[in-house]
Structures are given as structure tokens and as C-alpha cells.
Amino acid sequence: MCASFAAVAAMASLGMVAQTAASGVAQAADSGTTPMYRLYNRNSGEHFYTANPDEREHLLYEHWRDEGIGWMAPKESDTPVYRLYNPNAGDHHYTVRAAERDYLVEHGWNYEGIGWYSDDDERVPLYRQYNPNAVSGAHNYTTSAAEDDMLVSRGWNAEGVGWYAVAKGQAQQAVTMDKDGSYASIEGYMRLDGAGTGYHSKIDISDNKGAVVSFGIQYEKDIHLAYPRLASNVAFLVENVTSHSDEPGPEGKEYLYLDEAPLNKDVKVRISWYRDNSIRFYVNDLEIVRTRTRLVRPFIFAAEGSVARNGDSIDAGIHDVRIKVGNDSSSYGTMGEWNDRNDYFGLDAIISKYGAKIDQQGPYFTHGGHVQGADFVFRGTADIPGVDAQGQPWTWDTSFETVEPNTGEIGHPLSAIANIAQYRESSDDDSEW
């Protein structure tokens, strides 16, 4: 099921940042320097900086984007950097100037203490820019002269050097599925194309209790009107359904429209689930968002294509699909072959290439199935005529309430789905689950 953008739940508010502000005191690193984490809020446009790993972790689960380490700050110096928060605009500001701090406090900003320190040896400048058109996220700070020049060329005001770092930082680093530490993952190279009002290609992890998490690329007509930060109507979308999976509406569902995505171009996407019931989403091996789930092992993995309304078409594919399950001898592996018979309302999932069989014990063990590296194609035009009780045409959110013509049943998604399930060996200890 794909959410209508009108029903999307809001992402984290900046008020959540304010609530964690007291914990934003610089944490010492053993080397005498402190990594300064940089995060980005897609909704407000604010870049946020913190030395506190717990605050960073909290904001990541509030759907801020990880931008790596902005710079390395000294553990201590004679030049503190003051941190302030504007409760009206939801914006943070940072300055080494006590007079600027006091001026902002007089005008309603909250003083949040010393965030970190500037390097008294002035080794690496932090350039400061101001966006005169922004309410939140009006200031940006960077060690990159190229980023400084780029923002100024787009209308930001250059405000010189805000403070100094000991060393430059490092952007978020790519991590492969083999190295991401997850218990269960599915990834593949996704390409989306179609026609009509909406279409979507995605990968899924679900359980047998009604929870499902999916991630993919969605086209939806006029979505940029609801999300002006999107330059087009194509976006990466997370659907985190904790309950009510076969009912319309937002209850029990979390929808995250993320960054702009391409049409008709291969993009590597991945869902990774961790034993603490957190889940992370990757594009080209870079994490773009994380959240919490209610998934319960064992899992079902799927590759899927769907459309929004009757008459919409899809022409999509996901190739080189791989699955990882478990990381110890008592874990599940995957079983059997892919099943592409779950095709509803005129849409077809086709296994265009079976993958490899992996016989070795470990997270990629397929128990005889030709699984790893499979290719899928999703094609068709939706055949879901008629209207619901309110006289509205059926959609990918309400299709569960109408009869699927081939099966004569209700409760089916407006999708074409290929599934594969986990398999537990008889020697496994049930108490683990």
C-alpha cells in the first residue's frame, strides 16, 4: 500500500531539539579533540551541530539526516562557542561573541550554554553564512570554502569566520550490507517508470502479525505542492506500518517522504533491521533515515510494484536483489525460491532472472534456493473499476476494501509482489524468539 501525501505524518519538530538542548554539552574525545556531528532537518532546512552523541542519536530517530562529522573541535580552549535556541522559529544559533549571545537572549532566544570550543590556534576556519529569506535554518557553518562559495552564489550572505576547528571532519561514509551490523536486510538496484497519477517500486520486510516496512521510489502527481522542497513529483518513500495494514487511513502507519529521487534510472536501495527493533534505510550505501518498528521475526521479504488508481500503469524493475538474515549459528536463513504469484488488479511481478544458491552457513545461506542476485520486473495497468462507499474511485490506500477480480477476494493490495520467507532449522531454540 502507498500513502496519499495528504495523509503523511509530520516528521520531527524542532521543539524536540529544544527539549534535548540541555544535553548538548561538548563530550571529550581521548585525543583531546571532539567530533562535531552535523545533521539536517529536511522540513525546516536547518543544519544542526552537536558534540553530544546521545543528542545526535535522538535526532536521527526523529528523522534528521546524518551528514557525518562537520569538524573536530578542541576539548577545551579559551574561546567557547555559545549555543542559543529560538523557540518561535525553531532555530539554533552559535556564536563566540558574548555580545551577540546577550543581544539574542534579550530578544527572546534561549541560552543553552557552551556547545563546544573554538581552536585558539585558528587552524581551520568555520565559515558562516546567512540566508535572509529563511525563518529556520537561517545560518550555516562549514569548513568547506566550496560550500561557502556555493551558498553565497545562491543568495546567502557571507558572514566571514564564525570560529575555528582543529581539523576538518568527514562526510557520512558509505557502508555496505555486509558491514552495516544488521540482523536482516534486503537490497537491490531499483528503477521506476510508469504512467498516470501515481506508481511506486519498493522493497519490503514484513512479519506474520500485520507489520510491514517498505522503502522505494514513488511518483505521485502534485506531491511537490505538499512538499515544496521536492523539485519534482518523485521521492524516496518509507512506509512503516505497525498495525491496520489492510485498512485505509494513517492510523498505525508512518509515512516519510524523503529526498528527491530519479525516474527510469537504477538506484541502489536497502532496508536493514537491527535486533533492537530499529530499522535504517540506505541509498547507494548511505543511510538517509532511520526509525523504530514493531516487526517480529520470522520475516517475509518482498519486491513490489504498485500504482495509485484505475488506469495507472507501471514499468519498473529491481535487479541484483540480495537478502541477509542472521549473524550467528542459531539464526534463520532464507528458504526456497521467490514466489511471484501475488499479482493483483491487473499488475504482474515477473522473476526475470533467478539468483545464485549459497550453501555455506551464514547470513546469506539460502537453504537450496536460487535467491541471491535475483532480478524482477513489474508491469501492468490497474484494473480496479468502481467506487467506494463515499463514491470515490478505489486507490492504493483503499483497494483492500474491494474485490480483486481474479481471486474474488477482498483484502488485497493494488500491487504486484514477489515474496520469500525465512526458514528456521529444527535445531533452533524457540526461546530466542
Image (cartoon, rainbow, N blue to C red):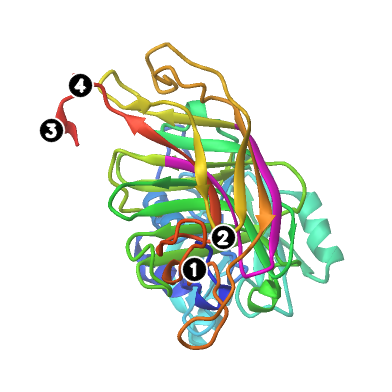
Q: How far apart are the alpha carbons under marks 4 and 2?
A: 38 Å
Q: Earlier in the sequence, mark 3 or mark 2?
A: 2
Q: Looking at the picture, how far across and down is residue 257, in whole percent? A: 57, 64
Q: Residues within 10 Å of mark 1 (few under 14, many from 20)?
A: many
Per the rendered image, the range of residues in magenta is 301-320
Q: Which amino acid, by three-letter code, is at mark 2? A: Phe
Which residue type does callout 4 highlight?
Ser
Q: Is residue 344 above or below residue 83?
A: above
Earlier sequence position, callout 2 versus callout 1: 2
Q: Are marks 4 and 2 in contact (CB under 8 Å)?
A: no
**Helix, strand or loop at disc 3?**
helix
Quadrant where the C terminus is found in the figure: top left
Q: Which mark is residue 399?
A: 1
Q: CA distance from mark 3 to mark 2?
A: 41 Å
Which residue is situated farthest in the right direction here? 153
Pointer 2 with pointer 1, Cβ within 8 A: yes
In the rendered image, which residue does mark 3 sit on? Answer: 431
Tag of residue 98? none
Q: Residue at x 69, y 48 (%)?
A: 316
In-image side of 162 versus 254 (left or right): right
Separation (CA) of disc 4 from disc 3: 13 Å
Which numbered circle lies on residue 345? 2
Label 1 secondary element: helix
Q: Secondary structure at mark 2?
A: loop
- As displayed, is residue 362 above or below residue 284? above
Three-letter amino acid code at the position of disc 1 = Ser
List the residue tagged with mark 4.
Answer: 426
Secondary-structure class at tag 4: loop
Which picture quadrant has residue 300?
Answer: top left
The picture places residue 216, in percent across and down from the top left corner, at 59, 51
